[in-house]
Image (tube, grey):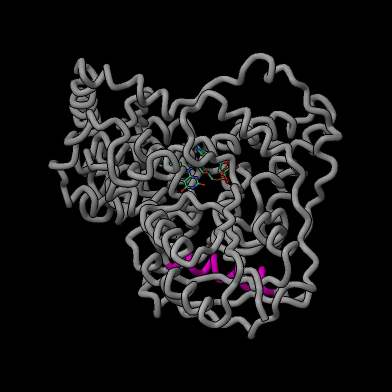
């Protein structure tokens, strides 16, 4: 039988899924997910990503099966798999979402495009985020984002048309070369988990969002924790925006959740704002956004600094505690991510690319467009953002004043008296021996003098920033990547509660 092919990528749901709906309007549909060995062999891939994906695929398959269909899994490079399916039965069209992925997936999409052209086959690609292909500049970008988010969410199609498939069998991670440990406390994949997390946040936890997202102690419950479900597409961004706005309008004035949800919606906008940068310039995974910063850190790579950072042995307690938490959970809040990158980029003077590759593996929610743009922003190579340098000792005092976080993740420090907790290397040796924590024996000593190394790093950065040619190149970067305010007329438009009522959260 001839069918339209729906290629699932990082959009593992049937709700608000334009490719599935449009394909099913044209006749029988075959739903396929391709496990591509080359993508899983890449340096930014990790076991936890694959296991989360597997859980999400099982969940998606169960939903399709309940409706009489199923998901077909293929293992192989995308073009080879498509060719195989084409030989089996020449399908009239290919349907998928657009993807703003890493360099490999970008190259893969170009190869698929060539393959489609060679067969005179139409590839229907649909936007799932507020990311615009072939964008000229950012002037009307936010208007476009608002318009996309206001469109009604799409119902899942009737599954009479979706082809049944064999029971799902997915390769083990080891067979794809994935050998990293799976963080034991990471979030589990699947739409059901995503919806539960969203509901819990909208109706309860959002009250702590404002004021709770910066401290690593409160952030795990104050933040929405939706990032991995958005990155793998278990939830659509639009349904999250609409459900949030619906809840926002339903809440009474003065309810703390209103402030939380308002701040949360602006993060959902940032989600696409940052992804747009990689969409417009895929080289940002490797190249400085402002090429005037080329050579700033590349040649100064110090392997011992990188090893200490990744092993959680920098000697700065808050930094090492964050690495320990990442190993166990696969997640950190924004401020702690920014602090890690700042420490790596300034006092440790490490180039952002290898640090970013390591963090991509550590973050369950790795989303290349957000990740690489943020890496560059925190490392100071965008050319258009203010320099952000986080002092890990000040951050500890501000966001973990009692030391609960540091003691939780670094048990060795539980014996250190509170007044020395964030700078144990300053403890007199006698006291170190008394409490049984000797620096450089039981715990790591800092690799560099924090203040001196940070000052040196800033001076080097400012020297580049001050160059006339570097200043001159800034305008073009703002034109391409800089955010804009909404035009006044649009900003005044009041959105009514009823606009968001039509969407309900469904499995
Ligand atoms: C160096 C660095 C790397 C990062 N890499 C990623 C990544 O790979 N994937 C990822 O989703 N986020 C990334 N972030 C952004 C942010 O830290 C995470 O989105 C957030 O911590 C996820 O938790 P949450 O869903 O509970 O966040 P919430 O605060 O509840 O935010 C809701 C959603 O908004 C988006 N969002 C939040 N903050 C930002 C931001 N600053 N920029 C862009 N989008 C944002 C995310 O989609 C997030 O899920 C990175 C930040 C830094 C500093």
Secondary structure character of the magenta stretch overall:
helix
Q: Is residue 463 magenta?
A: no
Left or right for 291, reference 17: left
* Image location of residue 272, percent across then percent down: 54, 39
- Classify residue 448 by image quadrant: top left
* Image location of residue 212, percent across then percent down: 60, 36
Query: Residue placed at 74% from the left, 43% from the top?
Result: 202
Q: Quadrant of the N terminus?
A: bottom right
Taking 412 as reference, is 241 above or below it?
above
Q: Nearer the viewer, residue 296 or 201?
A: 296
* Image location of residue 72, percent across then percent down: 60, 77
* Image location of residue 332, percent across then percent down: 48, 47
Q: Nearer the viewer, residue 221 or 372?
A: 372
Q: Nearer the viewer, residue 91 or 49?
A: 91
**Span highlighted in magenta in the image:** 47-61
- Classify residue 9 by image quadrant: bottom right
Left or right for 260, reference 279: right
Asked whether the viewer can see residue 131, the reply is: yes
Left or right for 416, reference 427: right
Asked whether the viewer can see residue 250, the reply is: no
């Amino acid at each position: 039988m001839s069918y339209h092919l729906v290629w699932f990528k990082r959009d593992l749901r049937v709700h608000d899924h334009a490719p599935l709906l449009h394909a099913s309007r044209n006749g029988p549909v075959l739903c396929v997910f391709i496990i591509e060995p080359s993508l899983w062999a890449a340096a930014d891939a990790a076991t936890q990503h694959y296991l989360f994906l597997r859980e999400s695929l099982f969940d998606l398959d169960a939903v399709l099966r309940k409706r009489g269909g199923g998901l077909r899994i293929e293992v192989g490079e995308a073009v080879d798999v498509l060719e195989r399916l084409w030989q089996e039965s020449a399908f009239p069209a290919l349907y998928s979402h657009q993807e703003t992925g890493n360099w490999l997936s970008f190259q893969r999409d170009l190869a698929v495009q060539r393959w489609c052209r060679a067969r005179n086959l139409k590839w229907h690609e649909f936007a799932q985020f507020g990311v615009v292909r072939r964008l000229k500049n950012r002037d009307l970008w936010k208007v476009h984002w608002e318009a996309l988010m206001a469109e009604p969410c799409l119902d899942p199609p009737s599954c009479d048309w979706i082809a049944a498939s064999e029971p799902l069998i997915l390769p083990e991670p080891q067979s794809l070369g994935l050998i990293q440990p799976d963080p034991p406390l990471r979030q589990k994949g699947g739409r059901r988990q995503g919806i539960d997390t969203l509901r819990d946040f909208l109706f309860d936890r959002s009250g702590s969002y404002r004021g709770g997202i910066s401290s690593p102690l409160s952030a795990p419950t104050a933040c929405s924790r939706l990032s991995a479900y958005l990155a793998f597409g278990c939830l659509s961004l639009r349904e999250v925006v609409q459900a949030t706005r619906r809840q926002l309008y339903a809440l009474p004035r003065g309810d703390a959740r209103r402030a939380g949800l308002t701040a949360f919606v602006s993060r959902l906008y940032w989600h696409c704002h940052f992804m747009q940068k990689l969409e417009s310039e895929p080289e940002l995974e490797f190249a400085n956004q402002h090429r005037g910063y080329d050579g700033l850190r590349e040649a100064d790579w110090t392997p011992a600094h990188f090893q200490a950072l990744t092993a959680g042995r920098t000697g700065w307690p808050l930094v090492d505690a964050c690495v320990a938490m990442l190993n166990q959970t696969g997640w950190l809040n924004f401020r702690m991510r920014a602090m890690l990158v700042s420490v790596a980029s300034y006092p440790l003077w490490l180039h952002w690319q290898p640090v970013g590759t390591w963090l991509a593996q550590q973050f369950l929610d790795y989303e290349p467009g957000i990740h690489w743009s943020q890496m560059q922003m925190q490392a100071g190579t965008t050319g258009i953002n203010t320099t952000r340098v986080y002092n890990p000792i000040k951050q500890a005092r501000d966001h973990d004043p009692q030391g609960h976080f540091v003691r939780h993740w670094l048990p060795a420090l539980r014996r250190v008296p509170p007044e020395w907790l964030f700078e144990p290397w300053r403890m007199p040796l006698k006291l170190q021996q008394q409490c049984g924590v000797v620096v450089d024996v039981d715990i790591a000593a800092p690799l560099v003098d924090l203040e001196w190394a940070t000052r040196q790093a800033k001076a080097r950065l400012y020297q580049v920033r001050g160059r006339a040619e570097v200043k001159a190149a800034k305008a073009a970067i703002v034109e391409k990547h800089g955010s804009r305010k909404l035009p006044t007329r649009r900003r005044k438009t009041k959105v009514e509660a009823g606009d968001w009522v039509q969407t309900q959260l469904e499995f």
